[in-house]
Each structure stands twice: as C-alpha cells, then as structure tokens.
C-alpha cells in the first residue's frame, strides 16, 4: 500500500520516490532509513497550479474592464455556479472584498476575495485566502481594433487536495473557456 502511495506521489510530483527495497538494493539507503519519512515530507508539499488562457475580443478594453470589475454581475457570465453573498463596497477598487459560494469538484465552497490588482482598463484581479490560496488576474491589451484578454488563475493546494490537481486544472480550464464564451455574449447584450 505504501509503495502504491509513493508511486502516486512520484507521478504527481514528477520526481522519483525510491521504495525502501529499491533503495537498499541500490545501496542508497542505510538499513535504518524509514520510507515513511520521505512520504511524510512529500505529503505536506504545496502544489502550484496555474491556468492561463488568452482570448481576443472585438470590444475596446474599457468595455471589457467595466464588466470584469462589476462584481455583482459575475454571476451573469461566469460558467461555474457561483452566488454572491456579500460585497464590501462598489464599484470594485483596490481593497474591495466579497464572499461567494462556488461549486468546486462537486463541493460547495465559500470564498473570501479581495481586489488586489486594479489598473483601470488594463488589469484587474483578486486573491482568495480560504479555503485555499489563489490569485485571479485579468490583463487587457489593445491590439488594433481588438482587445487581447489574458485570464490567469493560480492557486496553491496542499494535503490531500493536491491529489486532485490534474482534475482541478482540467475543471478550471473548462470553466474559464466556457466563461469567456459567455462573457462575449454578455458584453454583446449589454451594448
């Protein structure tokens, strides 16, 4: 059982985790070394997840930025089921806080978000501390008659949650792609 867990740890981390028998056969470990020590060290390692998507929009940056910074209306275009619980103040600016319910891997999570990036018509983002640390960033760049929107989500998972990292990356990527389609539709209907 421990061998299977260590092999899974090796697959997730990309680093080989020698099993006790393998290490002894190779002469790498003294007879008193416990394989559980390696397992425990890796068990509490923090995994970094980053998903980045770039999309072109046929709208000027100021229109896109206004929608991104309109926190109460994220529920109108974000594909993930979310519900705004509380907003400290509006419109969004540095320091604005809001709580929302979100569905993550089938679990309802309450997240507390704080706007920590705000450069009008160029950058908007927030950090979340609970239930895990994450950062969301939107970057807007004019490219002729189009606007390039870069959406970045970074988070840190630790403990048992990191075993679901490949699934979290896939789910986040799908949610972001669907949300961008919905964002374009939402902006068109708001014009």
Image: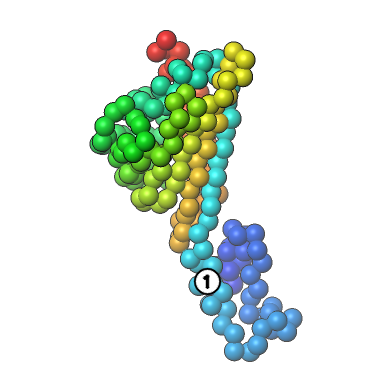
Q: Residue at x 36, y 25 (%)?
A: 70
Q: Position of residue 46 (x, y in %)?
A: 50, 59
Answer left or right for 124 relative to 177.
left
x 50%, y 72%: residue? 40
**Quadrant of the rendered image containing residue 108:** top left
Please tell me whether mark 1 sits on a helix, a strand or a loop: helix
Position of 1 with respect to 120 (left or right) is right
At a point 44% along the width and 36% down the height, the residue shown is 117
Q: Position of residue 136 (x, y in %)?
A: 46, 39
Is residue 127 at least partly visible in the picture? yes
Which image quarter is the N terminus in?
bottom right
Q: Quadrant of residue 9?
A: bottom right
Residue pictured at 35% horizontal, 41% vertical: 113
Visible in this render: residue 176? no
Which residue, given by chain and number where applicable, does mark 1 sit on?
41
Percent from the top left, x then y, of residue 78? Answer: 42, 29
Vertical side of 160 occupied by 18: above or below: below
Left or right, 99 with respect to 180, comes to left
Q: Residue furthest right?
A: 26
* Residue 174: x %, y % from top left: 52, 35
Taking depth in this image into account, of 158 and 164 the one nearest to the observer is 158
């Amino acid at each position: 059982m421990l061998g299977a867990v260590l092999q899974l740890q090796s697959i997730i981390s990309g680093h080989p985790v020698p099993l006790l028998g393998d290490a002894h056969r190779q002469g790498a470990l003294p007879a008193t070394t416990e394989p559980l020590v390696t397992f425990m060290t890796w068990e509490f390692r923090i995994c970094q997840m980053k998903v980045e998507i770039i999309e072109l929009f046929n709208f000027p940056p100021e229109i896109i930025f206004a929608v991104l910074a309109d926190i109460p209306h994220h529920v109108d275009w974000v594909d993930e089921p979310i519900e705004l619980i509380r907003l400290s103040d509006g419109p969004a600016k540095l320091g604005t806080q809001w709580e929302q319910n979100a569905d993550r891997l089938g679990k309802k999570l309450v997240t507390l978000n704080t706007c920590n990036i705000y450069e009008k018509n160029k950058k908007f983002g927030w950090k979340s501390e609970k239930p895990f640390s994450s950062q969301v960033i939107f970057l807007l760049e004019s490219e002729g008659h189009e606007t390039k929107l870069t959406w970045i989500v970074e988070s840190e998972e630790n403990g048992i949650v990191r075993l679901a990292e490949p699934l979290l990356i896939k789910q986040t990527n799908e949610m972001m792609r669907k949300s961008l389609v919905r964002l374009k539709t939402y902006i068109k209907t708001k014009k």
